[in-house]
Image (cartoon, grey):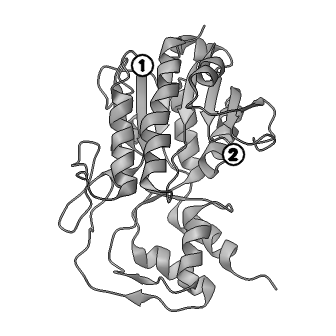
Amino acid sequence: MAGSVEGMVDSSPVVVVTGANGLVGTAVCRALVERSAQVRAVVRRAGSAPGLDGVTEHVGEFADERFAREVTRGADAVVTTVHPMGSSRDVQHRVGVEGTPVIARAARDAGVARLVHVSTAGVYDRSAGVGDVAEDGALLPEGSGDYPDTKNATDAALAQVGGLTTVLVRPPAILGAGETSVWNTLRPQTVRYGERMANPAQTWAWVHVDDLAAFIADVATGAVATADDPERGPVPGSTTPVIVAGEPATWRDYLGTVTDALGVEPEWTDEPVWTGRLLADRARRWGWAPRVGLAQAMDELRRGLTPRA
């Protein structure tokens, strides 16, 4: 029965995934199928959903109320992964702040048990002098940039959708191979063409997409039980943020790996920077443990950038 966490665990849950053809969305679909879920993959272009057993493609706009009602009917959970980072502020606002709550309200009205929204650790203040950051860390103020502003506003808008158990998953830089991967593909392209400046001591917080997807899939399928205490699980009928981050790393680790693979030199600086950690203690208490370590992630990154003979 839709809305029953116990039913989700005991049978094959039905999970809606928006942006199912993206880097994160694809990995989430794969992780859900591994957990025997039936996935409704929402995409805008026909034929672009992951070709996996248990995945059914649904072509449409999740911000369209009629489509949102149709795709969430009878579902147990909804995972939202879409935010057009890099687009104009107007587009980010329309898709994130205005669009995402549409499918959230449809999910609530359909009796969906959980909404899992991919937010970002980029909403937190991580300026020089700020220490370690947990879920209750200070958020960036309005005017900090199009991306953090609209991501913060999207989170706030989702929190206003009453009667729904919502989890705001907040990852930092997401590593993982793919043409649309920001940190494995797109950012290295800018490094190749000259953007190579960073303080090597600055914290570079990250998580691998496979570990992120595993956490999202466990939450969506009810493997993580709800709890009155957010340190033990999602709070029923409320909005619970949770940081998901891998082991500590610095810009020397990331930019050093990229420049070495590309055969160019980094440009190290010494300005004041954030050197704290993103604390993933809450996620770990929910039962999550990342499997991809920094060395493995950097090796994957390096292999993807090193020319093959």
Q: Classify residue 7 as left or right of residue 101.
A: right
Residue under label 1, please give it.
Answer: 164
Q: Is residue 206 left or right of residue 47?
A: left
Q: What element carries label 1?
A: loop
Q: Which residue is drawn at 48% across and 45% down?
A: 289
129 sits left or right of 57 in the view: left
Looking at numbered disc 2 in the image, what kind of residue is underneath it? Asn
In space, the residues marked 2 and 1 are separated at their CA atoms by 26 Å
Q: Residue at image x 79%, y 40%?
A: 46
Q: Tell me the quarter of the image containing the C terminus.
A: bottom right
Q: Which residue lies furthest to the top in this view?
A: 1
Place of residue 241 in the rendered image (x, y in percent of width and height, measured from the top left): 35, 37
In depth, the one of 33 and 49 nearer the eye is: 49
Question: In the image, what residue type sits under mark 1?
Answer: Leu
First of labels 2, 1 by sequence position = 2
Seen from this angle, which residue lies furthest left?
Answer: 129
Is any part of residue 69 visible from this angle?
yes
Q: Is residue 280 visible?
A: no
Total marks placed: 2
Front one among 304 and 138: 138
Picture residue at 51% right of the left edge, 87% below the top: 194
Q: Is residue 290 above or below residue 258?
A: above
Q: Mark 2 points at which residue?
A: 21
